[in-house]
Image (spheres, rainbow, N blue to C red):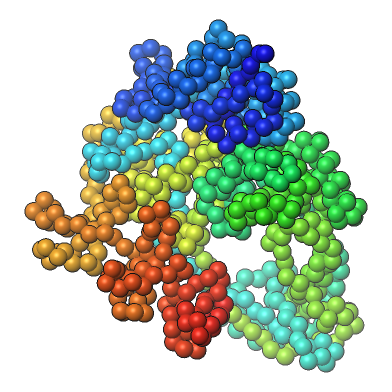
């Protein structure tokens, strides 16, 4: 009996696919990349047409030896790594590392891990696409040149251990520019003027908003402007000039791309980009479902296309028809207008089976897997449904030469919003507004001026940074999460309450790269580089041509930076902890396992202490600080800083607000505060406090 070997990246993926194929197939995993450029050297032969020097990744020798044994037993080998540049490159490296030149070997790809998709891919096997491989090689070589040329400059000018990345440096600049914009922002004053009006003697007033005069809009810049308008308006009769009633339709959202999934998961589920991608990978690779075995629940998670296959579209519309009725089935769907190239070989991220509702498999998924699958499933269903319909009313009101407006909306037909809520609008049409007619008598009861100030741009969150990177053409779907994770890991930025902030170290690194290597962190240059990489993928550009054109300018910039850039001193952050040995204030240092406290007197004084993040709450047992700690397995908890003398601990975050009923410590549970005194049991919403 002939045997066929299928090689994938992950053991989870191998396990799922093995169940779809018969006994004549064996599915094994490479555990990701098996070859890469060496870590200790540049790994690029600049004298030999920029040829990369690949070596076996440390720790992968044993895996390769096992794979070679399996290859010898097989009559046919299928390379089934992910359907993108990275996956194509892994297949190419496996082809050479396993010496498959003399073997019957084919490349297969599938957008979803289902029985039909996998079997169909085997029937449509192909050769390795070298255009995809070369696009990945170009990215890898460019990233290596930038990282290994600029990082030593950072070591000599700032401090050792720092590193620079081609795309990460641009993302860091974008965050730094936003921080600068916020810090330099000067607010401008402006005013609004509202009029409370009674209609036909009713007690409940309607609120009208000042817009201008008969000639057009008027901006109220200060109190004097408002007072002048109020003086002219207060004695004028108010009359209804026109009432327009109509409908407005809200289009259903597009199905998810990688970028939009990361943004929505951040907003709705409070998930980081890294966590979103990890969970999506699990859903893609396969989950055990009762009665169906192990199946992939979603399609491939790295895509910038919103295309949907005809079969998936038809199945989803049929499901909507059966569950919600004909009125909810959409007639068509919007298409994303792309500024650049769309990887249309992939579909959007969608469930592999629309009829497999999140509720039907809730018990077989972890809480987070369920929440993410539910988000993807409801978004896809919504994208195939009909628009939501709003009833609208717009009233123009005259007061002499001046004009006020009243507008209202009310949801008339849910449409897609039956399953998927996205920025739903509050109903602003009340009974008084609905009864209003041009014959209605209105009277002014009060004029209410309000002062406002323009607000600075918001700090980036992970979601808004991903959106900005996508809009600017920086990076690709597979790179968004690693970019943010890398910047956080290098401590160039920190995340607090979802917002991303620059650290002093990050500012120094960004400023130095902007000064020394302006083209590297130029947004347009980086976006253009992405277009060139797309050209390699399409077979229009040779990958080494890109490197040849890039390298000389890079080399020249490095020489200039070594000579011209000044050294930057980054001071250690001083804590309020006192060194027990010499009495100095301890400083916060960073080690392999995170932050720790060290004496600034090193090497004379070598005293160190663990660093604990204080949360500003006193221990209810001894009165000392409660700090954030971690168990050996990495789970967060809150304990007394004087442990083991004091044994206070809590899995929930203690609040600074004491219980109003008994004065005991309150802890945060979701969006509520709960008293820790079981006999009391007081609970309140956090927003109320």
Corner quadrant of residue 61? top left
Looking at the rendered image, the quarter that the N terminus falls into is top right
Where is residue 437 drawn, in percent x and y?
A: 89, 79
Please, which residue is most extreme toward the top here? 102
**Which residue reaches farthest left?**
604
Judge left or right: residue 279 versus residue 425: left
Residue 537 occupies which quadrant of the picture? top right
Mark yes or no: residue 46 visible.
yes
Q: Is residue 302 above or below residue 137?
A: below
Tell me where residue 375 appears, x and y as whole percent: 67, 53
From the viewer's perspective, is residue 343 above or below residue 185?
above
In the image, what residue occupies the spot 69% across and 25% down?
A: 22
The percent position of residue 478, horizontal first and vertical second, equals: 55, 38
Residue drawn at x 22%, y 59% is: 609
Out of 637 and 603, give the one closest to the viewer: 637
**Picture quadrant where residue 43 is located:** top left
62 is higher (above) or lower (below) than 184 = above
Q: Residue at x 30, y 27 (%)?
A: 40
Asked if residue 352 is positioned above or below residue 686 in the image, the reply reads above
Q: How many marks?
A: 0
Q: Report the front residue among 189 and 484.
A: 484
Q: Is residue 145 visible in this depiction of the protein?
A: no
Residue 331 image point, x, y percent:
87, 46
Residue at position x 25%, y 64% from top?
A: 575
């Amino acid at each position: 009996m002939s045997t066929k070997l299928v090689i994938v990246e992950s053991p989870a993926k191998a396990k799922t696919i093995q169940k779809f194929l018969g006994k004549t197939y064996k599915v094994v995993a490479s555990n990701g990349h098996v070859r890469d450029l060496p870590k200790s050297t540049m790994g690029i032969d600049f004298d030999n047409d920029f040829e990369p020097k690949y070596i076996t990744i440390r720790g992968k020798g044993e895996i390769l030896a096992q794979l070679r044994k399996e290859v010898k037993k097989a009559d046919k080998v299928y390379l089934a790594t992910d359907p993108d540049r990275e996956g194509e490159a892994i297949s190419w490296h496996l082809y050479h590392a396993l010496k498959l030149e003399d073997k019957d070997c084919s490349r297969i790809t599938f957008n979803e891990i289902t029985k039909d998709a996998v079997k169909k891919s085997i029937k449509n096997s192909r050769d390795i696409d070298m255009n995809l491989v070369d696009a990945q090689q170009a990215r890898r070589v460019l990233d290596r040149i930038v990282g290994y040329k600029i990082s030593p400059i950072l070591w000599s000018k700032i401090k050792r251990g720092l590193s620079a990345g081609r795309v990460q440096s641009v993302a860091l600049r974008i965050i730094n520019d936003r921080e600068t914009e916020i810090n330099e922002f000067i607010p401008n004053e402006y005013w609004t003027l509202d009029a409370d009006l009674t209609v036909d003697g009713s007690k409940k007033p309607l609120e009208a908003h000042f817009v201008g005069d008969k000639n057009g809009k008027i901006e109220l810049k200060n109190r004097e402007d408002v007072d002048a308008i109020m003086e002219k308006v207060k004695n004028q009769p108010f009359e209804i000039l026109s009432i327009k009633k109509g409908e407005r339709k809200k289009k259903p959202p597009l199905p998810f791309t990688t970028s939009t999934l990361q943004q929505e998961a951040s907003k709705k589920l409070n998930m980081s980009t890294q966590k979103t991608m990890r969970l999506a990978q699990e859903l893609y690779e396969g989950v055990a479902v009762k009665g169906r075995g192990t199946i992939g629940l979603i399609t491939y998670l790295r895509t910038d296309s919103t295309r949907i296959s005809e079969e998936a579209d038809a199945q989803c519309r049929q499901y909507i028809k059966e569950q919600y009725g004909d009125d909810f089935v959409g007639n068509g769907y919007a298409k994303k207008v792309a500024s650049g190239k769309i990887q249309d070989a992939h579909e959007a991220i969608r469930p592999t089976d629309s009829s497999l509702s999140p509720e039907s498999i809730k018990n077989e998924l972890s809480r987070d897997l369920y929440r993410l699958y539910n988000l993807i499933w409801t978004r896809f269903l919504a994208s195939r449904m009909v628009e939501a319909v709003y009833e609208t009313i717009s009233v123009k009101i005259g007061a002499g030469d001046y004009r006020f407006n009243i507008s209202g909306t009310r949801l008339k037909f849910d449409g897609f919003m039956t399953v998927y809520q996205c920025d739903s609008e509050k109903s602003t049409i009340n009974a008084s507004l609905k009864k209003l007619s041009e014959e209605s008598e209105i009277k002014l009861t009060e004029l209410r001026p309000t002062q406002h100030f323009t607000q600075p741009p918001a700090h980036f969150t992970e979601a808004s940074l991903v959106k900005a990177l996508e809009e600017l053409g920086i990076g690709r779907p597979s790179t968004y999460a690693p970019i943010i994770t890398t910047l956080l890991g290098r401590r160039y930025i920190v995340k607090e309450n979802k917002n991303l902030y620059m650290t002093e170290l990050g500012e120094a690194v960004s400023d130095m790269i902007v000064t020394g290597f302006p083209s590297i962190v130029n947004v347009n240059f980086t976006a253009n580089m992405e277009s060139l990489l797309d050209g390699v993928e399409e077979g229009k550009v040779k990958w080494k041509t890109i490197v040849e054109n890039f390298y000389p300018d890079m080399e020249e910039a490095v020489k200039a930076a070594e000579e011209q850039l000044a050294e930057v001193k980054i001071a250690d952050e001083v804590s309020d902890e006192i060194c027990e040995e010499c009495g100095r204030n301890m400083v916060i240092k960073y080690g392999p396992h995170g932050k720790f406290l060290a004496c600034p007197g090193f090497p004379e004084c070598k005293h160190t202490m663990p660093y604990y993040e204080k949360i500003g709450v006193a221990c209810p047992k001894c009165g000392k600080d409660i700090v954030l700690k971690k168990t050996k397995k990495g789970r967060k908890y809150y304990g007394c800083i004087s442990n083991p003398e004091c044994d206070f601990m809590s899995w929930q975050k203690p609040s600074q607000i004491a219980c109003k009923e008994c004065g005991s410590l309150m802890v945060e549970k979701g969006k509520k505060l709960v008293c820790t005194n079981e006999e009391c049991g007081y609970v309140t919403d956090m927003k109320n406090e």
